[in-house]
Each structure stands twice: as structure tokens, then as C-alpha cells.
Amino acid sequence: MTATTHREIERKYELPEGAGTRVDWGLLEGLGVAAEPVEHRMEAVYYDTEDMALGRRLVALRRRRGGADDGWHVKHHEPSGRHELQVPLLRSPERMPAAVRGLLAGLTGGRPLVPIATLRTVRRVLVLRGPDGTDLAEVAADDVEAVDERTGTVRTWAEWEVELLDGTLPEQRQEEVFAAVETVLRAAGGRPSASRAKIARALGAEDPGGDGAAGDDDGAADGGDRPQQGGGTKDKDKKGKKGKDRKSEKSRGGHKGSARPESSGTTGDGKDSGTKGSSKQAGTKEKPGAERDRAGAAEAGTAPADGPGPTTGEELLRTLLGELAERLVLWDFKARLDVPDAVHQMRIGSRSLRSVLRAAAPLLEGTAGDELALRLRELARALSAARDAEVTAELLPARAAELSGGVPAAGVASLRRTAQEQAEKATAGVRRRLGGREHLQLLADVQAFAAAPPVTDEARALPARDAADRMLERSLHRVERVARRALEEEAAGAQDAGAAPGTAAGAPGAAQDGGRSTGAGPATGTDAGADAEMRWHLGHLHSVRKAVKRVRYVEAALRDAGIRPHKAVRRAAADAHEYQDALGRIMDAVVVEQWLARTARSLRAARQDRYAVGLLHGAELVRLRTGADGGRELLEVLLAQLEENLG
């Protein structure tokens, strides 16, 4: 069984009753009609949970029979447009494939998927061709009869769809095709449709007074002004239908869903990609340049929440945890679909949720929040291997370019392919993990905790803005403590150098226990000792960077919830953020250096050429030593700034 995916680019129109016979395709400019219309009779059964878990997240599941694309279809939204995954029907067409159930498992939480609507459509399709004979678009005239399986209500309507057959057409050419067809349809009295989707109409979401949150499988037309309400839908009760007296269950509104953007020129959670101009390097007394917002950041795809913002600490925690839990579930779904950057965004989501739980710990009763934070940490770690390989693949070309052509292009290309292959392999491993019971239970527990967080009496009485101040201040004080401890251990290590060998940190955090440094000083006296000393310094910088990132995640979550802490706290957070770029560049170098070292060992074992990897590895070690040497001064400036801001 093979699943296929494609991006849909379409627009929808409505014509007055009987106007279809007046459409004159002879008016079509620059396009031709391939042949006579082909008629299809299709039946589509839409599925969702009882509480509309798919629909409220703008995901639609249907089983279609008839037409050219029989199968199970999962439709979802991305910033680039609507996308559809198709899975063939099984021998028993009504049986849902395991691949479909697994794909939606995180969204449904194991709840059963039941029919919510059945649509029977008579579709007449025309194919439009360009001057060179290439098929460019389909025009489908649909007569639809829909049954709301929840209430037994029958609705009928007619609509026209224009869909491009080649999603790779340049945007200007796409507009030319749509404009040519729209001119013909408008001449017959047509207009762009206000309807979002067939399923929304079928469930009454677009009736006058409908709840408008029934989900979206096709979406509204992409361009042009839209009337306030689409016409042409006729409702009637289906007699004798079981459940006809049941009230239509309103689907729940979604949460705000834009995942937080990373700063421009970064990879990883704020890591610098090496392709943008960098801010001031570590090793100076001046603060590095402020982070920049990255244009076109990925969005999770949830609908924005309406209504006033939170007013109490309890409401604030419900909002924060609810939005972050929803975001995590959505990125889990997109990771299963192998949407680009989904694993990275899922890791950010898990870290954001964990940061908020840690910051809000004094406002939460019991240990459930702490236990959940530990499980989220394990999830983030499991997602890290794929992201580290992606970071390396992204950075290698720029690293080679800095050596002014000294690294053979073929060698760089080969190394980058190796990193990309490792990233793909690690991502496949992530998707296998997502199908496990332990992970699905984590998603369920996160959502349950977010729906009813065990808040303290103090949180219930505390104004939301004051609660936000406390959370952000708690995160900032952690940065202050971690930076001070790092500097104290650096000073003690310098005094004790040579007295007793220390424990080298092989990677950021390796010499730490849960983010807390072991206190062991650096080993000295040999090249190996010098390397260990460097990595000991890097371990301290890594601890501080993690604490700074926690501040960023908490502040971003508060901003998304519509809460602005008081000015003094915001200023302290902004000052701390300014150090993340410099720390991120150093940690990027750690990731790349370790990958190059492992690759060099593999090539040596296979008796393959190591010239390119050797040049790059040597340059990366220089970069690391420079960062480690300047790190102490960077931490001193950061700590002084925090002490000034926090008093």
C-alpha cells in the first residue's frame, strides 16, 4: 500500500441556478478545452471523533469512492497551502487502513473515528490545456447532496471548482490561468464562493447562525473579494433517519497556533546558520546584537482563539498550557506526515511546554507538573539527533566557503549528503517512536493536564499579569544562578588547574547533571587535557544558553497568550535574549565539530579519503577554542546585566 501526497491549488465559484448552461468556453483566452466533460458520481464519507478533534484543527478525513481518486484522503493546511495525503482503499473499502489510523493517532488520542457526514456528488470535469498542449487545470461542476450523520439533516447545493494540475507552475502563470477561467465564469453570472469547504456546508457551519467551526477540507478560494455568506445551500430533514432528533454537536474552537519563529539566520532552537551577518563575537565586553525575527516562520495551523485574555493566574496557566499542548499535538501530526521542519518545531514545542511548567512550578500543586516536565525532556532528547544532523547539513557549505575554496567542492557535497542521509534516518526513527504507546500516552497526559492544571489558591487569586511577572522572573533568576555558578567554577578550576585532573565534557551537558555543573575542574597538561579543558568551558556556556532559552520560551508563550509582563521584567528578558545568538553560534560549532570527528573516524575505518573532513574539522576546532576563550567574558557581562535589572 502506497500513500501519495500533493499540494492543492484551487478556487471555488458559485453560479446562479441554470447558469451552467450559459458558460461559454469560447471566451477562454490563452487556454483551450481538451475534450467534452467527463461525468463522475462520487460518494465521500467524512470521519471525526465525537468532539470533532480533527475538524477543530482544520484536518479532514474522508473515504471517497467514484471518480479518479478512490481512497482515504487526509487534508491539512500548511503556510504553503492545502495538502492532501491519499491512501488506497483496502479490499474491504469500509475498513480504515492502519496507516491512516496511525497518522491521526496523536490528534484523536485513541478516540474512535465515526462518520459525521456523507456527500454524494455528481461531478462534470473539463480539462484545460495550454497553447503547447499541456494539461494545466481542471474545472469541476459539482451538484452535491450531503447528509449530516449527526442530525440526519440533508443539504444540497452546486459549486464550481478550478484546480491546477501542476502545482509547480510559476505564481504569475497560476494567476493567468485562474484569471482566464474566472472571466468566463463571471460572464455567466458566477462569483467567487464564500464557502470554506464542502464538509463545513454539510455540517451546517455555513448556515445562517451556524457555528462555523466544523473543519475545512477544501478551503475558500485563494483570491478575490468574498461575499459574507455563500448562497445556494438548501436544507431538509431526512425522514426516518436514526438520530434525526439529536442536536448538532458544536465543534470546539481551536487555540492560537503559530509556532514561535526562530531568529533569522539561525538553525536549531535559535542557532545561527552561518549564512547571515553575525552579531558581535564572544570575547568582547560589548553585548552581541539583538535577535531578528525570521520571516515566513512555520505555523502550527490552529484557529485563533476569540474572547478576552486571561485575567487571573489560573486562567493564564490554562491558556498557556492549553495553547502549548495543542501546538505539540499539531506538530506531532505534521512530523508523522514528514512535513519539513516538523521534527524541529516539535522539539521546540516540547521545550516550550517544559519551560512554562518549570516557570510556573510555585503556582502548581503536587508533583504532576514536574513529572510531565521530565517526560517532555526525554521527548526533546529523542528528537535531537535528527535536528543535529540537519544543522550540520545546513552549515557545511558556509563553513567550506569560509576556507576560500580550500575544501574540494566534491568533498563538501559528499559530506553534506552523508549528513542529510543521517538526518533522514534519524527522522524515520522519530516517526517510529511517535507510534509507540508511551508517546501517545504522553500526548494524552499533556492535554489532560493542560485542560485542568492543579493550580494553587494563590494562582487563583493572583492577577494574570502578576503571575506572568513571577514566571518570567523565576526564569531570569535561573539564568542568573547558572551564570554565577559557572563563573565561580571557572575561577575555582583556574586556581586548581594541575592539582587534580577534572572530568572532561565530551559534549554540551555531558559534564552536567540535569543542567547543573558537576563542579569538576578541567584536566590539564596534555593535548587531551587542553581539549578537555575547552569542553569543560563549553559545558558551562551550554548550561547558560539553555537557561536563556527557557526565558525566551516563557516570554514567547506569554506573548502568544496576550499577556505583557511589566516593563522592568520585559527589559530584563530582552537583555538576556541578546546573548542567545552568540551562545548559539558556539553551540552550533560544537554540533558540527562532533559530527565531523565521528565522520572522520568512520572514513578512517573504511580507508576512505579524509582530506575534506580533516580541513573542516581543524577549522571547527579553532572556532570552538575562540568561543570557549571568549565565553567567560560573555558570562560576566550577562551576569552584570541581570544583577542590574533584577536588583
Image (cartoon, rainbow, N blue to C red):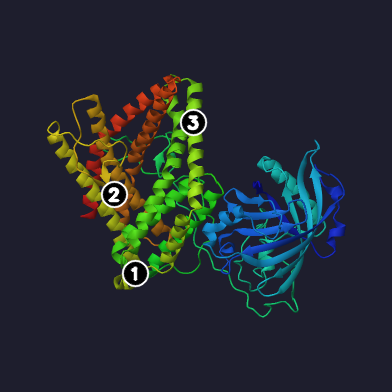
Could you say which quadrant of the image residue 43 lies in?
Answer: bottom right
Image x and y of residue 165, in percent: 73, 45
Residue 192 at what x, y percent from top left? Answer: 72, 58
Give the residue at mark 2. Answer: 514
Label number found at residue 455: 1
Residue type beneath disc 3? Thr
Identity of the residue furthest to the bottom in this view: 245
Which residue is at 28% across, 45% downward? 544
Q: Is residue 141 above or below residue 133?
A: below
Circle number at residue 418: 3
Distance from disc 1 to disc 3, alpha carbons, whole Å, reads 48 Å
Disc 2 crowd rating (10 Å Cα; few below 14, some 14-19, many 20+) is: few
Residue 516 drawn above or below residue 18:
above
Residue plotted at (36% across, 57% down): 373
Image position of 80 (left or right of 503): right
Query: Which circle's residue, 2 or 3, is located before the other in the chain?
Result: 3
| 581 or 42: nearer the viewer | 42
Q: Nearer the viewer, mark 1 or mark 3?
A: 3
How far apart in space, not on screen, are marks 2 and 1 (Cα)?
25 Å
Q: Are marks 2 and 1 in contact (CB under 8 Å)?
A: no
Residue 625 location, quadrant: top left
Q: Label 3, secondary structure: give it.
A: helix
Quarter holding residue 157: bottom right
Mark 2 to mark 3 CA distance (whole Å) = 32 Å
